[in-house]
Image (cartoon, rainbow, N blue to C red):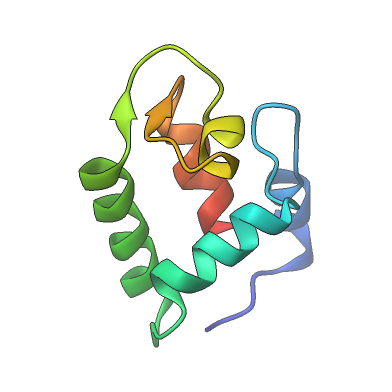
Amino acid sequence: MKELSDEMDLFLKASACCDSNSKVIARAAKNIAGGCKTSREAAIKVFYWVRNTVKYELGHCFEHLAQGQRIVHEQANLAVALRR
């Protein structure tokens, strides 16, 4: 996949709401989009996986993913972390 410019690094760092450095997130991202040939294809796969797999309810999405549960507080944060 195409590498992004250094200026984008600021926007791609992990945060408290988006722990993209998590080993659980990295493993899930590889399972979901590992065979994709383009960033667009990977983004689409992640979008549909989050939409179709993760039920929206109150909770903390990364903790629930690590526990194998299907509950999230913010699906968008999970999708962003998986794409990073």
Q: Seen in the image, is 52 located left or right of residue 41?
A: left
Q: Residue furthest toward the top? A: 58
- Nearer the observer, 63 or 49: 63
- Nearer the observer, 3 or 79: 79
Is residue 47 positioned above or below 16 on the image?
below
Q: Position of residue 82 (x, y in %)?
A: 53, 54
Q: Seen in the image, is 13 located left or right of residue 65?
A: right
Seen at 72% across and 51% down, the residue is: 22
Q: Seen in the image, is 65 located left or right of residue 49?
A: right
Image quadrant assignment for residue 67: top right
Image quadrant assignment for residue 9: bottom right
Q: Seen in the image, is 81 located left or right of residue 69?
A: right
Image quadrant assignment for residue 43: bottom left
Seen at 52% across and 30% down, the residue is: 61
- Nearer the observer, 37 or 64: 64
Is residue 59 positioned above or below 80 on the image?
above
Q: Position of residue 44 (x, y in %)?
A: 29, 62
Quadrant location, the C terminus: bottom right
Q: Position of residue 56 (x, y in %)?
A: 31, 23
Is residue 4 positioned above or below 52 on the image?
below
- Nearer the observer, 82 or 5: 82
Q: Position of residue 36 (x, y in %)?
A: 38, 82
